[in-house]
Amino acid sequence: MTTQMKHTFGLIGFPLEHSWSPSYFQNRFRELGLKTTDYQLFSIKSLDNFSQFLATTPNLRGLNVTIPYKQSILTYLDTIDPAAREIGAVNTITIERSGDDRELTGYNTDADGFALSADFSKHTNALVLGTGGASKAVTWALQKMGISFTLVSRSRYKNRAISYSDVNEAVMESHTLIINTTPVGMFPNTDDFPSLPYRCLTSQHLLYDLVYNPEITAFMKQGMTYGASVQSGLSMLHHQAELALKLFLDEG
Ligand SMILES: NC(=O)c1ccc[n+]([C@@H]2O[C@H](COP(=O)([O-])OP(=O)(O)OC[C@H]3O[C@@H](n4cnc5c(N)ncnc54)[C@H](OP(=O)(O)O)[C@@H]3O)[C@@H](O)[C@H]2O)c1
């Protein structure tokens, strides 16, 4: 009888309270018959001891990365996929090991996860709310899809953004795709939604919320009230996780 080596994957971030990842990946490993593979949460207060963490977790073959480390993790990697480098954020790491040597490669699956999550073919102009990490992945994907975008930020002119008070009827009319990449409306603040003139929406508009908890957000409810199509962040969440799984199993 041969003993298979155990492989561990996991999520690093801080704090990690309501993470969806362990049950998702554990179910997928079970479905794929990977009995010796597990998935753990690694709530890490700082990346200062990241090397030591890797050394003391010898079965670790891959990591998902979440807030607040998607950008600061870049300096700890040996190789960064060109797309992740352009976006400036990594949400998936593969770890190849040979004896005590390790090779860490960083990827960003949020951008492709977003591109795969909906049909954007009717849209040529997007309004992107927020200028954080998720916004960078989304705007990278929009550029690849040939969709122009305008950023909306609480700080006017940050990354050449306009402010929420600049979003008037003409702006709403000319941007049929409106994407919320801010955490506004996320559990437990489920009654909150970005401040926009929703009355200007039409049936041509798609309101896309990256927030996935709750599945129907207050932002999406505003869209539905005014006859727009809506999309939750759940599909992107699944797509980015499946892309990460593929990287883990191909290279982990
Ligand atoms: N569905 C998915 O697969 C998926 C993937 C990644 C992220 N997400 C979700 O996307 C959201 C953002 O994630 P992130 O990593 O980009 O976070 P982040 O880096 O913290 O950035 C969020 C941005 O939203 C804006 N913002 C923050 N608080 C705000 C507030 N109270 N009011 C208005 N705007 C505010 C800020 O932009 P300004 O300062 O320019 O206003 C900030 O840069 C989270 O809810 C996350 O769960 C979903």
Image: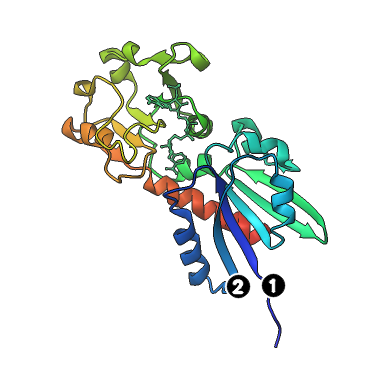
Quadrant of picture, ligand 1: top left
Residue on which disc 1 sits = 5
Q: Label 2: which residue? A: 36
Describe residue 141's horizontal placement relative to residue 227 as left or right: right
Q: Earlier in the sequence, mark 1 or mark 2?
A: 1
Quarter that holds the C terminus: bottom right
Residue found at x 45% / y 51%:
19
Residue 213 coordinates in the image, percent (x, y): 34, 45
Horizontal side of 106 relative to 116 (left or right) equals: right
35 is higher (above) or lower (below) than 186 = below
Label 1, label 2: how many angstroms apart (C-alpha)? 7 Å
From the top left corner, tell me how far across and down residue 196 is, in percent. Answer: 28, 21
Disc 1 and disc 2 in contact, CB within 8 angstroms? yes
The residue depicted at 52 percent of the width and 30 percent of the height is: 136
Question: Which image quadrant for residue 3?
Answer: bottom right
Would residue 228 be seen by someone viewing this image from the given angle?
no
